[in-house]
Image: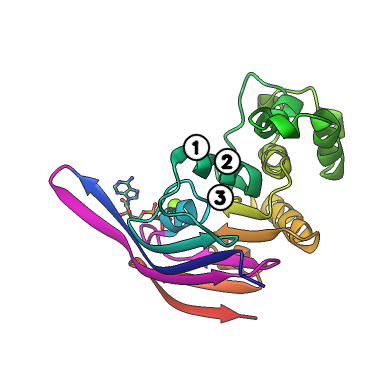
């Protein structure tokens, strides 16, 4: 079967006025369905840039990227967002919940952009929140939740459209270590239920939850290790 993500000699250059900086300098990366992988590297090494490309939030400057067999480079913006909305869920360090929306409304958000996803959306959102242990909080606003609870809501939102791939950029960066391990256990559980999961982290304790570590340094992958 073809891999979920296949990158060949992917480069990313940012232009800033007269200057341009090459942040990713030839990435070759294959991610198979069902993996749980960590991307590690020091600050500024290009982790988030790589994650944004993997997640189709941005496109490479050059190279080749196939997501689920589809060539990403050259897709129009609307096709790209459609691909993303249907296949990829995102979790970020600073949760990004809408402050004036309830927990349920936040989780429903991704379904609003998909006509086909609207049927049964509310039941699905409630079911996800129940699964994640937040059924009592459905009508709360985010500011009444702890950091760990807010991140769990963000994970439910990321799962709303039943994506194949779950991408998490420093998902535990704002959490204490106990809450961080709860969140990691949750991501592992989602992986066991069939999601491909990629976690960006600089924390070895977080990376230890993955079954593969992809190390990036100055825009290239330096080594990979599986355990
Ligand atoms: N949109 C952009 N325009 C210009 N430069 C950028 C842009 N995005 C990222 N960069 C630069 O690319 C480099 C890598 O950034 P990136 O955010 O990918 O690093 P990171 O590994 O995620 O770091 P951190 O651990 O601090 O989150 C940095 O030097 C950054 O300044
Ligand atoms: Mg980053």
The reply to whether dot 1 and dot 2 touch (C-beta < 8 Å) is yes
The kind of secondary structure element at disc 2 is helix
State the residue position of label 3: 173
| Residue furthest top as drawn | 100
Residue at 40% of width from left, 51% of height from top? 74
Disc 1/disc 2 C-alpha distance (Å) = 6 Å
On the rendered image, what quadrant is the C terminus found in?
bottom right
The magenta segment: 17-46
**Numbered tag placed on residue 113 in the rendering:** none
The picture places residue 169, in percent across and down from the top left corner, at 54, 52
Is 141 in the magenta? no
Residue at 86% of width from left, 44% of height from top? 131
The kind of secondary structure element at disc 1 is helix
**Numbered tag placed on residue 82 in the rendering:** 2
Q: Earlier in the sequence, mark 2 or mark 3?
A: 2
The picture places residue 205, in percent across and down from the top left corner, at 61, 66
Residue at 36% of width from left, 57% of height from top? 44
- Mark closer to the observer (2, 3): 2
Q: Is residue 83 above or below residue 24?
A: above
Our reading of the magenta stretch's main secondary structure is: strand
Q: Residues within 10 Å of mark 3 (few under 14, many from 20)?
A: some
């Amino acid at each position: 079967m073809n891999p979920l993500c296949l990158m060949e000699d992917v480069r990313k250059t940012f232009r800033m006025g007269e200057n341009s900086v090459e942040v990713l300098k030839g990435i070759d990366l294959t991610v198979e369905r069902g993996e749980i992988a960590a991307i590690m590297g020091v600050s500024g090494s290009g982790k988030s840039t790589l994650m944004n490309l993997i997640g189709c939030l941005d496109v490479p400057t050059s190279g080749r990227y196939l997501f689920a067999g589809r060539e990403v480079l050259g897709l129009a913006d609307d096709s790209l967002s459609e691909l993303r909305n249907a296949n990829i869920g995102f979790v970020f360090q600073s949760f990004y919940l809408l402050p004036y929306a309830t927990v349920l409304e936040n989780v429903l958000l991704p379904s609003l952009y998909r006509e086909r996803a609207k049927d049964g959306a509310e039941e699905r959102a409630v079911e996800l929140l129940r699964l994640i242990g937040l059924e009592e909080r459905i009508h709360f606003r985010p500011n009444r939740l702890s950091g760990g609870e807010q991140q769990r809501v963000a994970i439910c939102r990321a799962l709303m459209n039943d994506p194949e791939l779950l991408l998490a950029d420093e998902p535990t960066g704002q959490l204490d270590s106990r809450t961080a391990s709860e969140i990691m256990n949750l991501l592992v559980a989602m992986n066991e239920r069939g999601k491909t999961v990629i976690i960006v982290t600089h924390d070895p304790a977080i990376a230890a939850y993955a079954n593969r570590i992809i190390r990036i340094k100055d825009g290239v992958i330096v080594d990979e290790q599986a355990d």
